[in-house]
Amino acid sequence: MRDLSIRQLRVFASTARHGSLGEAAEQLFMTRSAASQALKGLEQQLGVTVFDRVQQRLVMNSHGHMLLPLAVDLLACQQGIWEQFSSESNQGQLRIGASLTIGNFLLPKLLADLKTVMPLPEVSLANSSQLQLQLKRYDIDIALIESNVIDRSLQRHAWTQDEMIVIAPTEHPLAEQVVDWQQLSAQDWVLREPSSGSREQFEHHIAPKLKHMNLVLELNSIASIIASVAAGLGLSLASRLACQQALDNGEVSQVLLPERLHRQFFVVYPDTNRHLPQLNTLLKQLGITSSDANQA
């Protein structure tokens, strides 16, 4: 059997990402015919097909899913070699995913610092659950998330912490008061959508201690949560990072919980991405070494 080529693996990985041979060819600056030939040659050498044809799309089959992490690992190793030995080479664009709190309140400063050492990354914002799905599909390279529920196939680093607080309308009877759980039990709540990091914190730390709760609204925007609370629709559990300006401006007030609640932010990525030079540059910027990773 002939050696598999980097070109074949690159066409395969790009097609897996886009679900389209045409899009893969365009991204790799190849003709569709050349890309098709490379993919066909790969399948012939392996003796299996790696895609099923479904409604004019290419969908990875079980063989493709087995091959993808190995192919991505090899391609990342090749990129690492070029970066290591080519002093004039420029690092490629990293694809970062960030949960909404991190993306809105921590990522801008991080990007400003990164700009001095590497090309600015492509950024995607979504909730923590969605970002992990994107990592597993190789749609992004690394994610900064606010969830403790992390897929076991991903590497994770503890990064920084945030305090979760209960906010209320400024005229609410519980505003600026130290409360017990019974006082919170009869309240209306405005919460983030299921699978978000903030909702996960509420379900884990607050909901089990409430005898009754009235969920009046679910929203997927931090700004809309704060605005809804300010308008008098209910209480919410939210990030202090996200709420501090609204608290300082007197738009909302804090309800003081019986105990303070903190959550951990994590940096997560597939193990196959560990060789990416851009990823390691980002980890270094965050004060993290890849050897410190813990598998979830």
Image: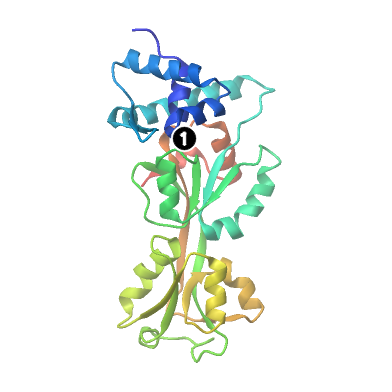
In this view of the protein, can residue 87 be seen by the observer? yes
Q: Residue furthest top?
A: 1
* Residue 293 visible in the current orientation: no
Disc 1 packing (10 Å; few <14; some 14–19; many ≥20): some
In the figure, is residue 290 to the left or right of 170? left
- In the image, what residue occupies the spot 64% across and 72% down? 245
Residue pushed farthest bottom? 173
Q: Nearer the viewer, residue 208 or 20?
A: 20
Look at the numbered disc 1 and give the secondary structure of its residue.
helix
Residue 174 in percent (x, y) is at: 49, 88
Task: Classify residue 40 by image quadrant.
Answer: top left
- Identified by mark 1, the residue type is His
Q: Nearer the viewer, residue 202 or 56?
A: 56
How many marks the image carries: the answer is 1
Query: Would you identify the image quadrant in which residue 194 lies?
Result: bottom left
Badge 1 is on which residue?
18
